[in-house]
Amino acid sequence: MTRKRIIGLFQTEIDVIRKIEEWQVHSSQADQQLYAITKDADFYVNLQNLSGAKVTSAKPSIIEKAKSLLTKNQPTKDYLVDFGLSEKEADAYQQEIENGLILLVADELPQKKERI
């Protein structure tokens, strides 16, 4: 699985779109795939259409919610770890996503090895 690089946490769709546009213009890694992670499944379709980024919802399914009640699992955190964030990053961003913020991340490019 490809590790992810955190770009930022945003409150509104407009803020995310601005950051994506800025990333595409000014980043030396503008061809990296960007992902917006949100708990709102309806929101992500609109954002994907407007921004060109792949957008995914961290909203747990009904089955995941039921399992979490019985096992004390945290479905949003588990989703973030499965997505490619570290445990520490998932802990840090889980509640923010559940509170409605949007997490923007990019695939981390592999390190180029220098030849000697």
Image (cartoon, rainbow, N blue to C red):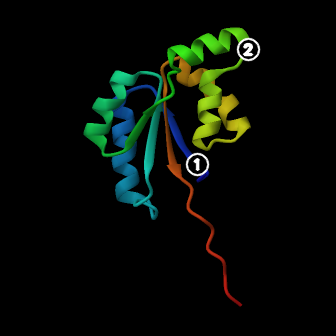
Identified by mark 1, the residue type is Lys
Identified by mark 2, the residue type is Thr
* Label annotation for residue 71: 2
Neighbour tally class for label 1: few under 14, some 14-19, many 20 plus, Cα within 10 Å: some
Query: Residues under labels 2 and 1: Cα distance?
Result: 27 Å
Quadrant for residue 110, please give it. Answer: bottom right
Which mark's residue is nearer the viewer, 2 or 1?
A: 2
- Quarter of the figure with the C terminus: bottom right
**Circle 2 — which element?**
helix
* Residue 77 in picture, x, y percent from top left: 64, 27
Between 24 and 41, the residue placed more toward the observer is 41
**Circle 1 — which element?**
strand
**Horizontally, is 36 left or right of 60 in the view?**
left
**Horizontally, is 41 left or right of 65 in the view?**
left
What residue is at 66 percent from the left and 33 percent from the top? Answer: 90
**Horizontally, is 16 left or right of 1 in the view?**
left
Q: Is residue 100 above or below residue 105?
A: above
| Residue at the outermost bottom position | 116
